[in-house]
Image (cartoon, helix red, strand yellow):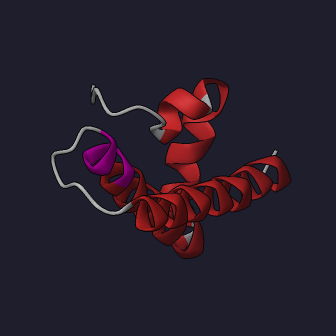
Amino acid sequence: MSHTPHELAAEFPEMAERIAALKGSDAHFARLADEYHEVNRAVHRAETLVEPIDQGAETDLRKKRAALKDEIWSMLQAAA
């Protein structure tokens, strides 16, 4: 298990099976999940100063992560 905060499985623990199923059956969902993972890792690296970036860029990454999370949540709800 990763120690990176905000991983999808941690954000939506009750949806873990649905996330796995959609990753395997819906290419768009899989791309969104992959992009969320990449952006989330970039935010984490910036927060922990592993790869420091300016505050504006970090804010933009956080906004992108939130938008991806919202879209993923919508797709999870629609698949219910």
Which residue is depicted at the point 41% across and 51% down? 40
Which residue is depicted at the point 58% across and 25% down? 13
Which residue is depicted at the point 15% across and 46% down? 50
Q: Which of these two is toward me, 24 or 77?
A: 77
Q: Is residue 63 magenta?
A: no
Answer left or right for 4 relative to 36: left
Q: Is residue 13 above or below residue 66?
A: above
Q: Residue 54: horizontal and vertical position, in percent?
A: 35, 63
Q: Is residue 14 above or below residue 47?
A: above
Answer left or right for 42 relative to 36: left
Answer left or right for 46 relative to 40: left
Residue furthest front as drawn:
55
Q: Which of these two is toward me, 51 or 22?
A: 51
Q: Residue 63: horizontal and vertical position, in percent?
A: 61, 61
Which of the image's four quarters has the C terminus? top right
Which of the image's four quarters has the N terminus? top left
The majority secondary structure of the magenta stretch comes to helix
Q: Quadrant of residue 53?
A: bottom left
Q: Which of these two is toward me, 53 or 63?
A: 53
Q: Quadrant of residue 67?
A: bottom right
Q: Which residues are magenta?
A: 43-47
Labels in figure, total: 0
Q: Residue 29: horizontal and vertical position, in percent?
A: 58, 65
Q: Residue 59: horizontal and vertical position, in percent?
A: 52, 59
